[in-house]
């Protein structure tokens, strides 16, 4: 059975979608957003970024809305917004599960 594409996003994919939740962006805007949002913890190179953008376009998470020379601007689609929200919910649940386990193990000690 073939794997479902992008059921779980990588950290960089998540931050790219997060960037689009703030509005339309081009590649350099996305890279700057990620660097600023993570205080430099997550850096994304051009090859990784444009690979992700290509996947997101193919999956219809984003659409290209403007091209000026080499600068391409994209916008998040409803499908992309839903993917971002689903991943956000999944990550929150991971944190909740980890915190619950931590409290349980501290109670045993």
Image: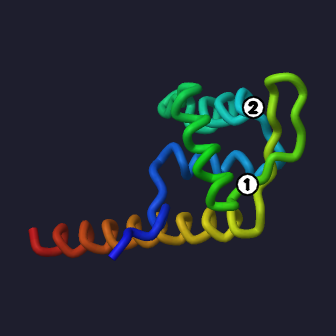
The residue pinned by badge 2 equals: 29
Residue 17 image offset from top left, x and y in percent: 65, 52
**Residues under numbered marks 1 and 2 in contact, where contact means CB atoms less than 8 Å apart:** no
Q: Which label is found at residue 62?
A: 1
- Circle 2 residues within 10 Å: few <14, some 14–19, many ≥20: some
Q: CA distance from mark 1 to mark 2?
A: 15 Å
Q: Give the quarter of the image for residue 73.
A: top right
Q: Nearer the viewer, residue 78 or 5?
A: 5
Image point 33% across, 76% down: which residue? 1
Relative to 45, residue 55 above or below: below
Q: Nearer the viewer, residue 66 or 41?
A: 66
In the rendered view, how is the structure colored? Answer: rainbow
In the rendered structure, the answer to whether residue 64 lies left or right of residue 48 reads right
Q: Which label is found at residue 2?
A: none
Residue 62 image offset from top left, x and y in percent: 73, 54
Image point 48% across, 64% down: which residue? 5
Residue 53 image offset from top left, x and y in percent: 64, 44
Q: Secondary structure at mark 2?
A: helix
Q: Secondary structure at mark 1?
A: strand
Q: Give the quarter of the image for residue 4.
A: bottom left
- Looking at this view, name the residue that lies furthest to the top: 69
Q: Earlier in the sequence, mark 1 or mark 2?
A: 2
Image point 70% across, 45% down: which residue? 19
- Looking at this view, name the residue that lies furthest to the front: 1
Rendered-image quadrant of the C terminus: bottom left
In the rendered structure, the answer to whether residue 46 lies left or right of residue 90 reads right
Relative to 107, residue 91 above or below: above
Q: Give the quarter of the image for residue 38.
A: top right
Nearer the observer: mark 1 or 2; the answer is 1
Image point 48% across, 31% down: which residue? 41
């Amino acid at each position: 059975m073939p794997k479902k594409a992008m059921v779980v996003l990588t950290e960089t994919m998540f931050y790219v979608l997060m960037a689009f939740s703030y509005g339309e962006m081009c590649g350099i805007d996305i890279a700057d957003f990620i660097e600023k949002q993570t205080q430099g913890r997550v850096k994304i190179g051009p090859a990784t970024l444009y690979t992700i953008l290509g996947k997101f376009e193919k999956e219809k998470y984003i659409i290209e809305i403007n091209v000026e020379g080499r600068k391409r601007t994209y916008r998040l689609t409803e499908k992309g917004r839903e993917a971002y929200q689903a991943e956000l919910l999944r990550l929150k649940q991971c944190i909740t599960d980890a915190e619950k386990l931590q409290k349980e193990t501290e109670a045993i000690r």
